Image: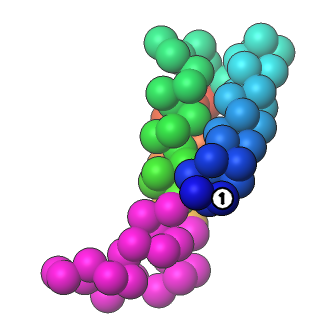
Amino acid sequence: VLWFGEARGGVMALLERYLAARIAGGQLRPVEDVAVSARLVLETCVFWTVHRHFDRAPQDVSDELAEAAVIQFVSRALRGG
């Protein structure tokens, strides 16, 4: 309950505010729904930091490569280019 309630909800709220502020400031492209986009970012990070280690068909990807790929993918998706 703690993770899915307070902790996860707090992270989601911070991420939503971050995205909304950066969109308003022109640093990020507008998105259809900030809450959905925040969830997409969070779940992408959670998969590559936690869930991939329990995947029944894992890829042999180092932590460094996973981190770089997530940063590149998310930043390009939100900034463009």
Q: How is the image coloured?
A: rainbow
Please state the horizontal and vertical placement of residue 8, each as a whole percent of the image.
63, 50
- In screen coordinates, is 27 left or right of 8? right
x 51%, y 38%: residue: 39
Residue occupying the point 46% across, 40% down:
40
Residue 22 visible in the snapshot:
no
Q: Which image quarter is the N terminus in?
A: bottom right
Q: Which of the 4 image quadrants contains residue 71? A: bottom right
Q: Position of residue 16 (x, y in %)?
A: 68, 29
Q: Mark 1 highlights which residue?
A: 2
Relative vertical location of residue 1 with respect to residue 48 in this rendering, above or below: above
Q: Which range is magenta?
A: 46-67
Query: Is 38 drawn above or below residue 21 in the view shown?
Result: below
Judged from the image, the secondary structure of the residue bearing numbered disc 1 is loop
- 64 sits to left or right of 47: right
Q: Residue furthest front?
A: 1
Work out whether residue 18 or residue 9 is closer to the camera in this orientation and state it. Answer: 9
Q: Can residue 8 be seen?
A: yes
In this view, the residue in front, 42 or 5, is 5
Task: Residue type at mark 1: give it.
Answer: Leu
At x 53%, y 44%, the residue is 41
- Considering every residue shown, the one lying at the far left of the view is 57
Above or below residue 65? Residue 6 is above
Provide residue 73's location: percent of width, then percent of height: 48, 49
- Residue nearer the viewer, 68 or 43: 43
What residue appears at the point 46 percent right and 68 percent down from the top-left corner?
Answer: 48
